[in-house]
Amino acid sequence: MFKAIGRWIKAVGYLLTGQIDSARRVLDTNPHVIRAKYDAIVEEKIARIHQYKQAVAGLIAQEEKKLSKIRRLSEEVQNLERLKAGALAKAKQTVEALKASGSDEQAIHEDEHYKKCLNAYKDFSSTLAEKQERITELEQDIEGYKANISDHKVQLQQLLRDVEKVKAEAADTVADVITAKQEKELAETFAGIAKDGSAEELQSLRDMRQELKAEARITKEMAGTDTRAQEAEFLEYARQSESTSEFDALIGLASDKQSGEADPSPEKDQAKPSLPE
């Protein structure tokens, strides 16, 4: 019994599923539903494009930051170049002054002002090399950003074209669905006109009419009304015939045969031989 109940439940489920699928099919072919679905697809694509744009904007922002760093580092490099040149000029001036005072090379290298200029020159050169290296790295990063941003811009343009295609496809699909429905309805209408069963219905009505007439005739005969009608017709005919004959007799138009039968001649009675007494 439980197996039978289970099969029954499954059958009901299949029935409901079929009905739902059929109803969904009807809804899916509705032009308004199709338009709404396409609108949802377009909105989803536009939302993704917006996210994509935000991501590309982030890349552009990073590129701008790196460009700003390059500009700042370039200014620092220029300043370091000037400082480096200044330290070198100061060292030359110091060396010339020491040489003028008779100091030898060792004394010059041990001079405090010389060492200060030398250390400054080395620091400026080291810092300058680091900043130039950083500028080179930033420039390479920017080149990569430019390539990526360029590719992403192409992708964005393609996505925007896809959205326009989907919009055009939506309009074409809705138009095609409406046209197809109209053509289907028109074809079904013509098919209904060609095969609407009117001929069969008309013949059925005619057959029913004949059957009812036959049934009425049989019923009439079985009830004796047909016989009584015939008798009444015959009696009426006889009455009219008698009235006509009587009228003809009164005006002297009755036939001899009718007169002879009605009134026998006396001569014939006298011509008969008399019986002997």
Image (cartoon, rainbow, N blue to C red):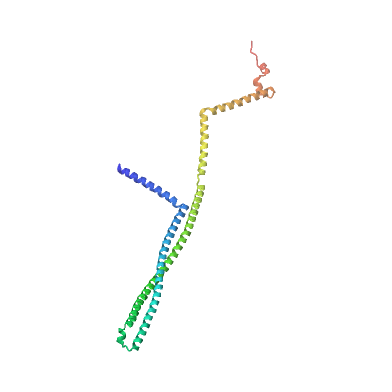
151 or 68, nearer to the observer: 68
Residue drawn where x is 51% and y is 30% of the image: 219
Compare residues 186 and 52 and report the one nearer the observer.
52
Q: Position of residue 147 (x, y in %)?
A: 40, 70
Residue at the right extreme, as displayed: 251
User: Looking at the picture, how far across and down is residue 62, in whole percent?
Assistant: 39, 68
Q: Image point 55% across, 26% down: which residue?
A: 228
Q: Is residue 123 above or below residue 161?
A: below
Extreme-front residue of the structure: 101
Relative to 259, is 141 above or below?
Answer: below
Q: Residue at x 44, y 50 (%)?
A: 27
In this rendering, the answer to whether 267 lies above or below 207 is above
Quadrant in which the C terminus is drawn: top right
Q: Quadrant of the N terminus?
A: top left
Horizontal side, residue 43 vs residue 118: left or right = right
Left or right relative to 85: residue 190: right
In the rendered view, tell whether residue 86 sits above or below residue 162. Answer: below
